[in-house]
Image (cartoon, rainbow, N blue to C red):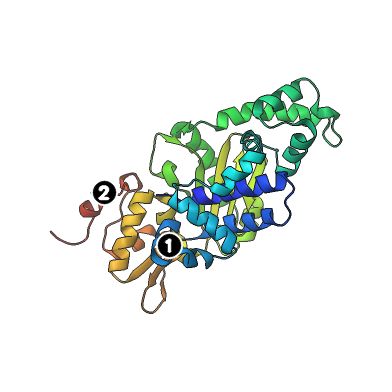
Amino acid sequence: MVTNKQVAEKLYQIADLLEIIDVRWEPLAYRRAARSIEDESQNLTQLYKQGGIKAIMEIDGVGKGISGNIEYMLKHKGKSDKFNSLTKDVSKGVLDILQIPGMGPKKVKRLYQELNINSIAKLKSAAKTGKIQELEGFGKRTETEILSNLTRKKKSQNRIPRKDALPIAKKIIARLKKLKEVQKVNYMGSLRRKKSTIGDIDILVSSTKSKKVMNFFTKMPEVVKIITNGETKSSILFDGFLQIDLRVVPPESYGAAAQYFTGSIEHNIILRKIAIKQGYKLSEWGIFDRKTKEQIPTKTEKAVYNIIGFKLIPPEKRIGGKEFATYSLKKN
């Protein structure tokens, strides 16, 4: 199943490519749509099955053109004809360059247009031979940073061991706990499910002052690059090699959000189906009565599972299988 994250990432890539070839307005539209997809509580594949392309177009910022591109992705396992078309004009290697800390679309566009740099190899060669510092607005310092960040990118391409990720997550959580605006905070995702390796760190905060929390998060000294910065979600590149995503939700939604962002995807899909059968709608924003549309406050995960008919299922057991029978509150 194609995930919302995969679709959003592809839309961001399309936006970057459009900006590099000097297409006006479209990059903004694609980035807006990508942010909305990231915030969408329902999986796009399920949404499309239920309501077709009209359901996709109801998402904020997703118009007719972009919805068509999303429909194509959902039908073709995440592949995009728009993306493929753009990479005929701009090498896919340009996207690799965009993943390097400090290399945004504007900077990459200049390197591409003025020095024909369209791959990591060409970028490294140009930096080593002093060609980049000759460009107006770059200089020796920028060139040195590029060489340094190329090494960091190599490290970031690999999943990292849990034992290395956990201390970083705990350090950031300790900082966030000191903020008076933060009521609850914990790490989520594969790290919380105790997987042996992780791709990135997910952190969830309960607060009514999301802007202040996000401002603190994105200005930490180890932040090399701000990937996205919104009121409820921000992503950073921490210390040049690890992506960290922060979500902020109101207190009454924390339990449902913790359940959702812990995963796994397979576990969540089954739990949602069970909730629907019982007359509830479950998302990261809470549990809602499908008839009255009223939210049932769930400040803890235990409350979420209890309402749907289960004991609290430990994060490491959430794999989308026998755990539902094992932790059911119903007597056999």
Residue drawn at (22%, 60%) of the image:
329
Work out which quarter of the rendered image holds the C terminus and state it: bottom left
Where is residue 234 drawn, in percent x and y? 60, 51
Instruction: Name the residue nearer the viewer: 153 or 30.
Output: 30
**Mark 1 surroundings: few (<14), some (14-19) or many (≥20) residues within 10 A:** some
Query: What amino acid is found at the position of numbered circle 1 in the picture?
Result: Leu
Query: What amino acid is found at the position of numbered circle 2 in the picture?
Result: Gly
The image shows residue 326, relative to residue 157, as above or below, that is: below
Q: Quadrant of residue 192?
A: top left
Residue closest to the far left:
332
Residue closest to the far top:
129
Instruction: Name the residue nearer the viewer: 301 or 48.
Output: 48
Disc 1 target residue: 47
* Visible residue check, residue 155: yes
N-term-proximal mark, 1 vs 2: 1
Residue drawn at (43%, 52%) of the image:
75
Where is residue 259 drawn, in percent x and y? 40, 55
Disc 2 target residue: 321
Where is residue 196 drawn, in percent x and y? 40, 34
